[in-house]
Amino acid sequence: MNLGPRRQRLLWLSVALSAAGYLVFALWSGWQEVWAAVKQIGAWPIVVALLLSLVNYGLRGERWHLFLQRWHYNVPRVLNQRIYFAGFALTTTPGKAGELIRSVFLRPYGVVWHRSAAMFFSERLADLVAIVILTALGLTYLPQGEWAFLLLMGVLLCCLLLLRTRFPENLLRRVAGQRKSVNWLADVASSSRPLWQGRLLWQSQGLSLVAWLAEGIGAWLILRTLMPEISIEAALFIYGFAMLVGALSFLPGGLGGTEATMTGLLVLQGLALPEAVAATVIIRLATLWFAVALGMIAVLSLPPAPAASDSHL
């Protein structure tokens, strides 16, 4: 599937600039100390973390397939996974908005733009809810943390129930007034409503939770090589909270915000700065950058698209 020379140049430029910035971060605290900590982590936790990341991507791709099935689009499951993976090539964009490139790949199969945008919006929301749950679960290692967990779960449940109504759309339209940018969000929320109904809501949220839990466990396996005493709850909190900060910063791929937060939390846990940087770099390589690499491979290997279809309009 041909993106065209201009889009390909922009794709490579986006990845190259993000990688260059990341290299600066990796060398920030002294490459010799960081490399020594990387060797201490060893190969097997990294391999297992990569496999758990694959589980994450596969489950999220299956969620995407469920969204397509909801509108009766006939995109084979294997092809859908390849298109979904291709979106990871532009994960290092503000708010991961570049992943909307899947709309380009799905258009020849009759998937209209407003529905692929609704799918993107719904999956971002499902991911956010799942990461908040992981972060809240991690709070249970703190004194009285169980009450904070239960409170957050109650708030999230109410939010999920609200998504089944017209409340988000009506609120956005009321806030928007004549501003087209916010009205556009209201249109996307309206198109997303079928994805938040009935069994599909709980299926997609369940897949999201298991997917991000897999990556959280991968982060814990890496951290415990440097901090044998760290609990899985503490690791989930560090990973989840850092991901939340990165997501809410709207920086490209959360770059900078996620790394600084994760490194800072690890230092507060008693880890030396070079080891904290090394653990953060490895975790992000096994999650973010592994996804980007797979996305680039998927983009280059997508089959030629069929003639564009106007069905399901």
Image (tube, grey):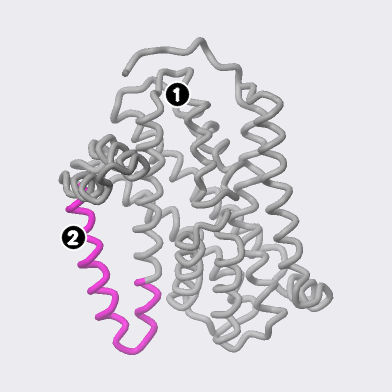
| Magenta portion: prevailing SS class | helix
Q: Amino acid at mark 2?
A: Cys
Quadrant in the rendering for residue 181: top left
- Considering only vertical position in the picture, is 196 above or below 38? above
* Badge 2 or badge 1: first in the primary sequence: 1
Quadrant in the rendering for residue 128: bottom left
Quadrant in the rendering for residue 129: bottom left
In this picture, which residue range is highlighted in magenta?
136-163
Residue 135, x across and y down, in percent: 40, 70
Residue 52, x across and y down, in percent: 54, 55
- Considering only vertical position in the picture, is 254 above or below 149? above
Mark sitting on residue 17: none
Query: Does residue 144 appear to the left or right of 131 in the view shown?
Result: left
The residue depicted at 60 percent of the width and 76 percent of the height is: 263
Residue at the extreme top: 307
Badge 2 local density, few (<14 within 10 Å), some, or many (20+)?
Answer: few
Distance of label 2 from label 1 (alpha carbons): 35 Å
What residue did someone put label 1 on? 76
Residue 46, x across and y down, in percent: 66, 61
Q: Quadrant of the N terminus?
A: top right
Residue 67, x across and y down, in percent: 34, 35
Q: Is residue 160 shown in magenta?
A: yes
Residue at the extreme right: 32
What residue did someone put label 2 on? 158
Q: Quadrant of the C terminus?
A: top left
Asked whether 36 or 243 is in front, the reply is 243
- Considering only vertical position in the picture, is 86 above or below 284? above
Q: Amino acid at mark 1?
A: Pro
Q: Secondary structure at mark 1?
A: loop
